[in-house]
Image (spheres, rainbow, N blue to C red):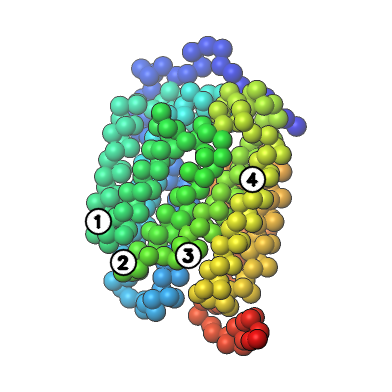
Amino acid sequence: MAVQIYVPQSDNLTKNSSTVSVRERLKAHLRIARVDHSVKQVFILPGIVLAMALESAHSSWALAGRIGVGLLSATLIACSNYVLNEMLDAPFDRLHPTKRNRPAACGRVHFGWGYAQWLLMMAAGLVLAGTISLGFLLSAMALWVMGCVYNIAPVRSKDLPYIDVLSESINNPLRFCLGWYMVTGSLLPPMSLLLSYWMLGAYFMALKRFSEYRQIDDCRVAASYRKSFRYYSQESLLNSGVFYAAASMLFFGAFIVRYRMELILAFPLVAWLMSIYFGLSFRDESAVQNPEKLYREPKLMLALGLCVAVFWLLLFVDMPWLEAVLQRPQS
């Protein structure tokens, strides 16, 4: 059933700033940092694992400390971006059936405090980043800058069709780099894997857009909430998702051939995971629209857990016979 977008008829629907207590306001400012979205930092872990495998790095207390500081730094940067997103999206969130209940859209956020919160969280994150490595610091800065590109006019890439998906999903390879530079600062991550990670994120983001658009089910109403929806349709969003999925697997295959042939055995699990996610995007109020809730999908979590376990195994277990079977025949 299509969701009807709520359009406010009166400013009375927005809380007057003077009626919000200090306690309510502090709780609202904590909420707009979206600490619960920290689950997305899971995209950092592959960078850590792969760097340890390719660099033959050993576990140590020093490495554990860098990882802990790095995760805190990445979380602060991400929360800074969420604060900005929530404040700048408030006028549009009031047109959405559920997002209109967000603190900024309800008038519980003091925007002066909010901008100070945005900058302070960024500064704290970058100070911590500087203690790890130059590569980590630059990756953290890029993650914050992309949050500005995504949210701030006149660029505001989230309003541009296809650019919105690509600019948001580039956070995936940036998070991979954060994990990579927690372990090593001497090398660049494999470009083929970064491109695969980027396109995989674009696949997830395109399906998130599809799920939102499908649930609204009215192109004019959808465009009032998100400007990029003026140029999309359900068909175009699904078509773009297929393109991103194919591109991701192409670059993943290039990485496998160059670095680790054993990982080809994980491909069926990756395909299964992507197909489960595709199916979820057709549900009303799907967790695809709120990725921080994906942990509630047991089938998806099972597929993800198996992928992680098999990837870990294949990164450290050599299978010489596999390369012999798959190599090009000698003429």
Earlier sequence position, callout 3 versus callout 1: 3
From the image, state whether disc 4 or disc 1 is nearer to you.
Answer: 4
Q: What amino acid does circle 4 point to? A: Ser
Q: What amino acid does circle 1 point to? A: Gly
Residue designated by label 2: 185
| Image-quadrant location for residue 282 | top right
Q: Circle 2 — which element?
A: loop
From the image, state whether disc 2 or disc 1 is nearer to you.
Answer: 2
Q: What amino acid does circle 3 point to? A: Pro
The residues bearing labels 4 and 1 have C-alpha atoms spaced at a distance of: 37 Å
Do the numbered discs 4 and 3 sit on residues whose CB atoms are within 8 Å? no
Badge 4, how many Cα within 10 Å: few under 14, some, many 20+? some
Residue designated by label 4: 240
Depth check: give the residue in front, 64 or 89.
89
The residues bearing labels 3 and 1 have C-alpha atoms spaced at a distance of: 21 Å
Depth check: give the residue in front, 295 or 304.
304
